[in-house]
Amino acid sequence: MTGADQTIVDGLDLPALERFFGEHVPGFQGGLSAELLQGGRSNLTYLVTDGQARWVVRRPPLGGLTPSAHDMLREYRVIAALAGSDVPVARAVAFGSADDVLGVPFSVVEHIDGTVIRTVEQLHALPDSEIARCAYGLVDVLACLHAVDPEAVGLGGFGRPQGYLTRQVQRWYDQWQRVRTRELPDMKSLYARLAAACPSESGASIVHGDYRIDNAILDLADPGTVRAVVDWEMATLGDPLADLGLHLVYTDPLFGPVLNGSAASTSGRLPGSADLAQHYAQASGRGIDNLGFYIALGYFKIAVIAEGIHARFLQGLTRGTGFDTVGQAVAPLTAAGLRALTDRDPR
């Protein structure tokens, strides 16, 4: 944690935040220090403390080029709604609008003690049996999320499940047009083929929108237990198989450069995509027909997100390291999406 005399942490005005905490955060003792935990790829995430308690503050990235992907209020709303459900989440504490002290919307949630496995090296410190328990435990939590009744937790109006897939295909192509830094013919081909192959939704549920191992806080003593799912800024109501397809895409080594070349989700020691898909089918009771389409949609989405990160890197708007490799992933991910539409089955 940085020193107590700090007043500005990149993207976070601490004196202004202290004023907000004094008015909105129960138990705040005065005086904050902060540390940037994650920056640039997603919303900026900070660990903040008054020396007694710890919280996590999230705000949009600097120079956000894809605003719908960084919706702070949506993230806060879904975390608050899932409290008390079978889906583990951090306790929602306070929300600040763009008119409040930071000039951008931001959220405050409780800090959860646990471990986040981001790299292959961290994952490989575990024995194979624990790695498998971790992978299947994550899928079990995904199935639990998709079993939550949105109406029962106050999220009945959180999205429009009907037509979700068609809107997703169009939305991510529109995002591509906004953030692209180069011409990529395969992207246009993938968009056209997804639009033509779009099936009816398999069902309707809360979807996370970015579900992978490093968006979960795991128990320190038991990596098979998820203590909290985080990074909900792309959550909505939609087709649950879109979450599954994206989760499977994250196992592809082609995703590695997006996370500095060592994404834990790409480890060959994790169960294969086919095994994870079958485990989800058993845990959720859902059919997994047309899975190739959902996997292709996942590649499409991640390729566009990677291009957006690359664009922010070129503009000097990322924070932290490892962003120089992200742009290398875009073309291979797009090509993999085209292959998925042909293959139609996970590896």
Image (cartoon, helix red, strand yellow):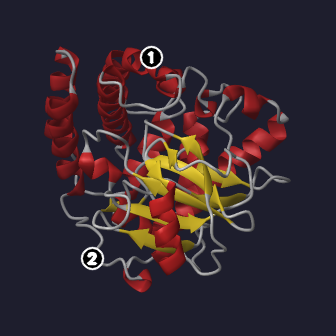
Q: Judge by depth and name the residue closer to the eye, 283 or 253.
A: 253
Circle nearer the viewer, 2 or 1: 1
Front residue of this view, candidates 105 and 92: 105
Residue 14 or residue 186, whichever sits in front: 14
Residue at figure coordinates x 25%, y 48% from the top left: 67
Q: Residue at x 68, y 34 (%)?
A: 270
What kind of residue is marked 2?
A: Gly
Task: Give the secondary structure at mark 1.
Answer: helix
Query: What is the C-alpha distance between the residues marked 2 and 1?
Result: 39 Å
* 326 displayed left or right of 37: left
* Residue 67 left/right relative to 134: left
x 32%, y 16%: residue: 331
How far across and how far down the image is residue 151, in percent?
Answer: 37, 82
Amino acid type at mark 1: Asp
Q: Taking 278 as reference, is 292 left or right?
A: left
CA neighbours of label 1 inside 10 A, class few (<14), some (14 to 19), many (20+): some
Residue 156 versus residue 231 in the image, above or below = below
Instruction: Residue at 61% x, 33% y: name it.
Output: 272
- Element marked by disc 2: loop
Q: Is residue 115 above or below residue 310?
A: below
The residue identified by callout 1 is 324
In this picture, residue 52 sits left or right of residue 333: right
Residue bearing the label numbered 2: 157
